[in-house]
Image: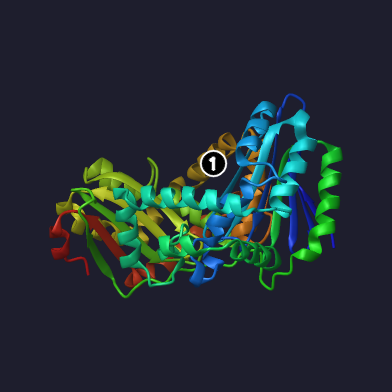
């Protein structure tokens, strides 16, 4: 099985149902080569609850392991070559990467293969990284902003939800993790994951070598799921949730969440609705609350894929919160959206210009764009696909999404965060 899709800069090849390769060939005048691997069930949400933090622990061990070299020796050697390597652990993915000068691409690929697909972790490495992780945990867990964020998540989401899960794990678990546990977690990650490999600045010879290598490894990956599974958090029962915490600000941080289906097919509708009604200098909400009423200091909004809702976040003085929520509700009055119809084509044209500017140098940016679409929608949509989607979106399409959100207003949730207990007395519903 080999499916090949090419854009102006990026080629996507599906080596097998669970092995994917996106690459950008080397271009004259460019010097950087980078290789990245993503394992879709390598993240902390897919680890055993009896060994919380093991995925992050494994990531540390993998990236510091190369043959029988000590981490210090490896670091010194890579420094002399100008080669860097890194790894990361999220809720869903674990990733590794190696990057450097194009002239060293063959050596980089050898290092990348070893740390990613054939790690040889020693007890010495395990204990060294355990000390580092415990120190990292102590620093992170003691930080006021972390304590605030954790407190918010614990109040908003049910136990076991992705948003309430700690990637670093617990001190108790990290102290007990053995080398056998790490090796077992690595084996389960490989078996259960889709493997997505990204390469930028690759010579044609290295492209062929990578494809051959992935073809040889494809039998290792046997996931029984799609590339992307939406790890959806579950809200606790609330419509209005005031969160008072000593590390929060004096003012009110307002989070409004309204259910909305988030799919690739309605991306054009969602993005243009955001520009027409919410964000930016034209947006109704921004203009009303900031320019006319002078009530907010900050506004941002997005459609959250893994949760299927529209999220609007603002910062304002507490005395303005009730009126702000009423303005948000009023934004979904059909009269408001219909007032924007006369400017729709102008706003769409402006939106397309901004997208073109932001993606002017697509040499590196498009590979990330396609990768994100693979993760979000299980399909390698390109920048061209996205721009065509925006172009064909009509005002009636936008109105359709607006109506669906309006019909979900009764399911709206509001969270207010402040260090001032006055927020507990607000009447929002």
- Write the residue at 69% across / 51% down: 116
Residue 368 position in % (x across, y down): 63, 46
Task: Name, please, the residue furthest toward the top.
Answer: 29
Quarter the C terminus occupies: bottom left
Residue bearing mark 1: 349
Residue 349 position in % (x across, y down): 54, 41
- Write the residue at 52% across / 65% down: 45
**Label 1 SS:** helix
Residue 177 in view (yes/no): yes
From the viewer's perspective, is residue 47 above or below residue 280? below
Q: Nearer the viewer, residue 308 or 162?
A: 162
Residue 232 position in % (x across, y down): 49, 68
> How would you rate the neighbour count of disc 1 (Cα within 10 Å): few for under 14, some for 14-19, many for 20 or more?
few
- Write the residue at 69% across / 48% down: 115
Query: Is 346 left, or right, of 264 in this rendering?
Result: left
- Write the residue at 27% across / 41% down: 291
How is the rendered protein coloured? Answer: rainbow
Residue 372 in view (yes/no): no
- The quadrant holding residue 233 is bottom left
């Amino acid at each position: 099985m080999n499916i090949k899709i090419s854009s102006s800069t990026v080629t996507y090849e599906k080596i097998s149902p669970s092995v994917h390769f996106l690459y950008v060939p080397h271009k004259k005048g460019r010097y950087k080569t980078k290789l990245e691997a993503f394992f879709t069930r390598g993240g902390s949400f897919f680890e055993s609850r009896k060994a919380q933090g093991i995925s992050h622990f494994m990531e540390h061990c993998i990236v510091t392991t190369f043959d029988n070299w000590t981490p210090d020796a490896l670091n010194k050697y890579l420094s002399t070559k100008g080669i860097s390597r890194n790894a990361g652990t999220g809720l869903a993915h674990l990733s590794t990467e190696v990057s450097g000068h194009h002239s060293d691409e063959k050596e980089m690929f050898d290092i990348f293969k070893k740390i990613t697909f054939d790690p040889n972790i020693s007890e010495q490495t395990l204990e060294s990284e355990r000390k580092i992780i415990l120190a990292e945990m102590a620093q992170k867990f003691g930080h006021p902003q972390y304590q605030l964020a954790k407190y918010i998540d614990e109040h908003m989401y049910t136990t076991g939800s992705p948003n309430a899960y700690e990637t670093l794990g617990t001190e108790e678990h990290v102290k007990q993790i053995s080398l056998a546990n790490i090796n077992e977690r690595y084996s389960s990650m490989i078996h259960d994951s889709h493997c997505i490999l990204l390469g930028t600045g690759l010579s044609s010879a290295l492209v062929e070598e990578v494809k051959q290598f992935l073809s040889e490894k494809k039998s290792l990956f046997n996931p029984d799921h799609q590339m992307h599974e939406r790890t959806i958090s579950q809200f606790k029962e609330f419509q209005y949730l005031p969160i008072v915490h000593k590390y929060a600000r004096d003012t009110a941080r307002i989070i409004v969440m309204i259910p909305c289906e988030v799919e690739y097919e309605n991306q054009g509708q969602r993005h243009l609705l955001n520009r027409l009604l919410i964000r930016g200098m034209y947006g109704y909400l921004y203009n009303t609350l900031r320019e006319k009423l002078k009530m907010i200091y900050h506004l941002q909004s997005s459609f959250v894929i893994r949760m299927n809702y529209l999220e609007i976040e603002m910062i304002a003085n507490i005395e303005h919160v009730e009126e702000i929520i009423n303005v948000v509700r009023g934004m979904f009055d059909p009269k408001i959206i219909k007032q924007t119809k006369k400017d729709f084509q102008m706003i769409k044209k402006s939106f397309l210009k901004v997208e073109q500017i932001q993606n002017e140098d697509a040499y590196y940016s498009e590979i990330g764009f396609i990768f994100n679409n693979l993760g979000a929608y299980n399909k390698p949509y390109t920048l061209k696909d996205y721009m065509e989607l925006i172009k064909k979106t009509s005002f009636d399409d936008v109105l359709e999404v607006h109506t669906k959100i309006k019909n979900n207003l009764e399911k709206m949730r509001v969270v207010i965060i402040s260090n001032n207990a006055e927020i507990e007395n607000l009447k929002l519903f």
